Image (cartoon, rainbow, N blue to C red):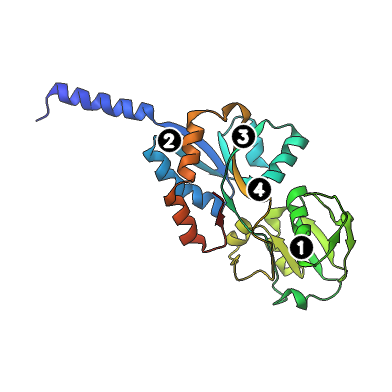
Amino acid sequence: MFSRTLLGALALLAATGAASAETIRIAATPGPHAQILEAVKPVAAAKGLDIKILEFSDYVVPNQALDAGEIEANSFQNLPYLDNQKKDRGYRIEPVALTVNFPLGVYSKKWKSWDQLPNGATIAIQNDPTNGGRSLLLQDKGVIKLKEGVGFKPTPLDIVENPKKLKFIELEAAQTPRALDDVDAAAINTNYAVSAGLDPVKDPILRENAKGPYVNLIAVRAGDTNKPWVKTLVESYHSPEVKAFIAETFKGSVLPSW
């Protein structure tokens, strides 16, 4: 039988261990971002960091919640999108680590290849400046030509050459998979493509080049960038275990960027 002294010591040790664990709330969009964070959780837990994952189905709320102090971090966006949000909304949010890249794809239920699209075809793209612009930057495939100097946020008004007279319809990013029944093709972010049951490697009829400025990141409030839990979170995300999980689970549709 344990002595009272030993039992007391064990209770104190348990209480000390519980107190030493730090909990953070991190937002992600459903699909790969949230799945990867689930793989990060046990790695972080072994380092004394308890991660609570909150899923948001759009690209607006995670930064609102972070700036308002309702969460400690988010993992869902790329730097052009974050920079645009900070400029438009005054958020004091900073990137602390790169995560993964999701090459954007153009999908179609009506056509098996891009070359089959008829003149005047309708293409759904995202309506936020950076993701919509990202779709238009598929000009590197020779689809369209944009004005010089438009940067990473072109709009359909910046198209100067459109040989196939394509018509672009702007929708919320989360709605683009649902538009596939009504348009000739849709540009869909990988996380939403996966959630819709699409294969981001095999199904696109056009695919973004893997290299570029659209690598995703972990963001925190500006005042938190040097806190110890941020270092632990980044180390856990950038671990060999998480890299192996990404390779095995997504088989090339999601690429580690560290």
Image height of 52 relative to 152, above or below:
above
Q: Position of residue 249 (x, y in %)?
A: 48, 60
Amino acid type indicated by mark 1: Asp
What is the x, y in percent for residue 115?
Answer: 76, 76
Q: Residue at x 84, y 50 (%)?
A: 150
Q: Residue furthest left?
A: 1
Mark 2, secondary structure of its residue? strand
Q: Amino acid at mark 4?
A: Asp
**Residue 58: x percent and y percent?**
66, 48
- The image shows residue 251 at horizontal and vertical percentages of 51, 64
Residue bearing mark 3:
66
Q: Taking 121 as reference, is 54 left or right? A: left
Q: Nearer the viewer, mark 1 or mark 2?
A: 1
Whole-angstrom CA distance, mark 3 to mark 2, is: 18 Å
Name the residue that disc number 4 marks.
58
Q: Which residue is mark 1?
A: 140
Q: Are marks 4 and 2 in contact (CB under 8 Å)?
A: no
Judging by the rendered image, the residue that carries numbered circle 2 is 49
Q: Quadrant of the N terminus?
A: top left
Mark 2 is on which residue type?
Leu
Amino acid type at image mark 3:
Leu
Question: Separation of disc 1 and disc 2 at Cα?
Answer: 42 Å
User: Would you call the spot at circle 4 few (<14 residues within 10 Å), some (14-19), or many (20 or more)?
Assistant: some
